[in-house]
Amino acid sequence: MFQFKRQATLANINLGNLSAPPAFGDMQFLMEQALKFRGRFVEISWTVPKTGLPFTLTAKVLPAQPPSWMLYRGNGANSQLIWGHNSSDLTLMHNLVLLECEKPCGPDDPTGAGHNTISAEAANRVLENNAATGSIQSHAAASIQLSAAQAQAQAQAQAQAQGAVNAPASSGYTGEPKSTWLLALQNREFSPAASQAAAPELDAPLQSAECSQAIGSGMEFLSTLLPGQSMLEGSLSNITVSNVLRYIGSNALTGRLAVQGMVGSAEVFFRAGCIEHAATLDTKGDSAVYDVITCQDGEFKFYADEETPQKTVVADIATLLRNGGGLIEQSRFIEAAGLTPVSYLLKKRPDLSRVEFEAIVARGIAIDPALQWKFWESIDNRSTLAEVLRFRPMVRAEWTPLLFNLLKSDLIALASEPQTLRGRMLIEPVPVDQVGVDMLLKTISNPEDGILRFAAFHFFLQQEFFRYERSGGKFAIMIFSLGNRQRLSENVQLLPGEVIAEAAMRINSKKRKLDMLFHFEGSDYAMLLPETDTAGAAVFANRICQILVKPPLCPAIEGDELVFSFGIASIPDDVRDPGTLLAAAKVAKGRAKMTGVPIVLYASLSE
């Protein structure tokens, strides 16, 4: 079960590129924007003139927590995480940034990746200098153990960095923070940062040089953390999940990595750098790690020393990353082809026999032929990918290579509209009284938002149960609530009526014609999903979260402020009668609201 409270993410606010390492005034301006856009990552980039190395610095501010700083070397998602700190000391952060920029790199190591970051002697000197001026607390201490030669080199770099602080003009600062930005900032409107970097090499073994990318054995250097506060956090627009896993494994950290992306939530537990347990909404264990690896947007947080008794992951990190490298390439291929959850899948050769089909897909990635054929049979030219997955639930690590094969083999096409197949009209059809249907729906709907009334829910639920008794058809219900979290107080408030109406319109536009949306008890809502099991309902619930986050429901409510609490139960997967079904979904919804988990399945509560 997931415990990551941020249920939606937005892209970084990119302030543009500097012509040189940031001056103190630039850092002040970065912090001003982080304070203005609380809860969002704000970033700047620059290239060091001496070495040509590109860097990116991000800052994020949350209520009742010190600012979170992350420094990356490299461009986009292919970058390396150098360090992360939770600190309110702007002078200290500026000194650490300058120290990294002054780090030497030779012809044998042009990227500087083989050099450890900030030696113990240099870092201690930074601490002493700042402590002397009262800019940091006396209890702050460094836990770094590097070689004496590296310490001496970094001490020299510290002296140069200290000179840079005393002479800010040398770093490109001209006295006005905004003057160093290449991006026009008059209106303070920033576009999201985009990452188009190539995939990193994932099949290389973990080297000792990579282990030295962290500052010591922990990331809480120079900061004190409150209980439950993240020790390390960042945006997946700056670094891949694979590199985050490498970082944690290389430094033998223990704790929980929480990933929140547009494809859902996930968590990975580590013990001394080894993955013990991983879980997503759909799966656990090794397959959950593969699902996490393919996540290319969103945010991550690492909470130190959180452990779990579960042991679901068998393979080691190196093996998981090596096998997951292919999934990343396949995921990027199908996304480049334009595949989204709302893409309609169209068969290019619908007349293929099973023998012919298996002969064609056998030339691609090795996947169970029976599984591929079942998926192929599920494509009816009138269903989106999300609808196909609701009918035949599969985890991302399963359907990604399968769709890669079908697209590579030119067996399917993607479309924004369904393909309609009309046969010969043998008789003249009698038109349906649509006006009468609309009038009936109007009488059982709430006029303010168009959502069906609570009493109607019980009637249609009963009818669906009768159908189940007669034919054995499965069905699921979702009970859920929507709210928005206040940025300063963190309190969750109900959404205004006009926002609920917009949300209902979006949900109705993406649901199947069989699915029905109702008001439920109090301010809750319910959906009745015929011919859908628990896994299929979870897929659709995750889809609802996505369509309500982007674009924002209204200008005053951003996507990262929405709070979802879904409880899901189904017949016959969980229970066998309507009353128990309602109770099960309410219990799951209550657990979601209590834990901050966006989607909870009743089945998961009994595991």
Image (cartoon, helix red, strand yellow):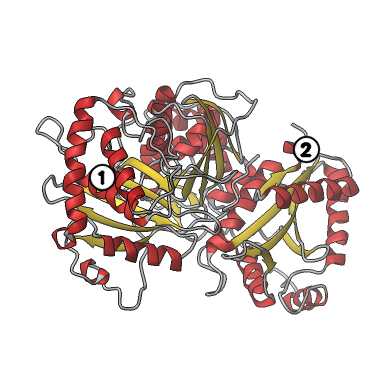
* Residue 143 in view of the camera: yes
The answer to which of 239 and 72 lies nearer the viewer is 72
Residue 434 occupies quadrant: bottom right
In the picture shown, does residue 358 fall above or below 221? above
Of labels 2 and 1, the one closer to you: 1
* Quadrant into which the N terminus falls: top right
Work out whether mark 2 precedes mark 1 in sequence or the reverse, and give the earlier one: 1
Q: Residues within 10 Å of mark 2 (few under 14, many from 20)?
A: some
Q: Residues within 10 Å of mark 1 (few under 14, many from 20)?
A: many
Residue 151 occupies quadrant: top left
Q: Residue 438 location in percent, x, y? A: 75, 76
The answer to which of 447 and 500 lies nearer the viewer is 500
> Helix, strand or loop at disc 2?
loop
Q: Amino acid at mark 1?
A: Gly
* Quadrant into which the C terminus falls: top right
Q: Residue 155 location in percent, x, y? A: 20, 38
In this figure, which residue is indicated by the disc labeled 2?
A: 573
In this figure, which residue is indicated by the disc labeled 1?
A: 74
Residue 508 falls left or right of residue 221: right
Q: Residue 12 location in percent, x, y? A: 40, 58
Residue 556 occupies quadrant: bottom right
The answer to which of 534 and 362 lies nearer the viewer is 534
* Residue 410 in view of the camera: no
At a point 39% along the width and 66% down the height, the residue shown is 33
Residue 470 falls left or right of residue 408: right
Q: Amino acid at mark 2?
A: Asp
At a point 19% along the width and 58% down the height, the residue shown is 166
Residue 25 falls left or right of residue 300: left
The residues bearing labels 2 and 1 have C-alpha atoms spaced at a distance of 48 Å
Q: Residue 518 location in percent, x, y? A: 77, 64
